[in-house]
């Protein structure tokens, strides 16, 4: 395998980890929203922390090997519009996802507290786990992540 093949392998692996983590977080978040008992919600939302590992590793692989590819190939320039756009969307995805994730963390902490206090359903917890603002942040973050993927695949404006 050539250097290019290895760089591309790690870059694409990072993309799969990053977007796969988003899918895992979505599945667990939806499952939590369908539960009533605080202990179940806390468990499911706690498992989303493992998605955070995928986000972190995916982010690192994407950036390091993506930039290395641009430098190594000498075909594209880091200032090409599709690369700049992808980097901006990538940062937006991370920032917006962090905001949504912070809301989810507060919900998990509430679920843990309520689980310790009797594990009975709570209107406050139900409202928090189904919070429309957190949902909007998570949708926006995911869409930005998939938009990055589209830019990487189609490379609009590249020759």
Image (cartoon, grey):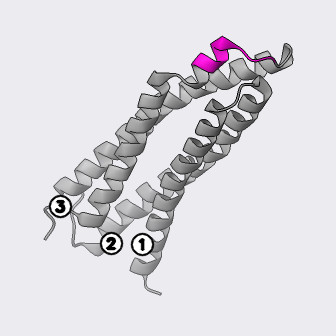
Front in this rendered view, residue 44 or 73: 44
Q: Is residue 102 magenta?
A: no
Residue 35 occupies quadrant: top right
- Where is residue 2? Give x, y as percent: 43, 85
Q: Nearest to the eye among marks 3 and 2: give it.
A: 3
Q: Is residue 54 above or below residue 127?
A: below
Residue 41 visible at all: yes
Residue at 48 percent of width and 53 percent of height: 19
Q: Earlier in the sequence, mark 1 or mark 3?
A: 1
Q: How many numbered marks does the figure carry?
A: 3
Q: Which residues are magenta?
A: 120-127
Q: Residue at x 47, y 73 (%)?
A: 9
Quadrant of the image occupied by residue 107: top right
Badge 1 density bin: few <14, some 14–19, many ≥20, Cα 10 Å: some
Q: Quadrant of the C terminus?
A: bottom left
On whether residue 126 falls in the magenta region, the answer is yes
- Residue drawn 64% across and 39% down? 31
Residue that badge 1 annotates? 8
State left or right for residue 73 relative to residue 117.
Answer: left
| Residue for badge 3 | 156
Q: Which residue is mark 2?
A: 72
Mark 2 crowd level (few <14, some 14–19, many ≥20, 10 Å Cα): some
- Can I make out residue 79 in this image? no
* Crowd rating for badge 3 (residues with CA inside 10 Å; few <14, some 14–19, many 20+): few
């Amino acid at each position: 395998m050539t250097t290019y093949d290895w760089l591309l392998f790690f870059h694409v692996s990072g993309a799969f980890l990053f977007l796969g983590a988003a899918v895992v977080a979505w599945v667990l978040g939806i499952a939590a929203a369908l539960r009533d008992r605080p202990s179940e919600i806390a468990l499911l939302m706690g498992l989303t922390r493992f998605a955070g590992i995928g986000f972190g590793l995916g982010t690192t692989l994407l950036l390091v090997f993506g930039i290395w590819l641009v430098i190594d190939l000498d075909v594209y320039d880091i200032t090409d519009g599709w690369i700049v756009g992808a980097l901006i969307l990538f940062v937006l995805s991370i920032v917006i996802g962090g905001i949504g994730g912070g809301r989810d963390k507060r919900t998990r902490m509430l679920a843990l507290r309520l689980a310790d206090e009797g594990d009975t359903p709570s209107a406050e917890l139900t409202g928090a786990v189904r919070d429309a603002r957190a949902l909007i942040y998570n949708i926006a973050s995911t869409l930005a992540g998939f938009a990055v993927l589209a830019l990487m695949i189609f490379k609009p404006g590249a020759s």
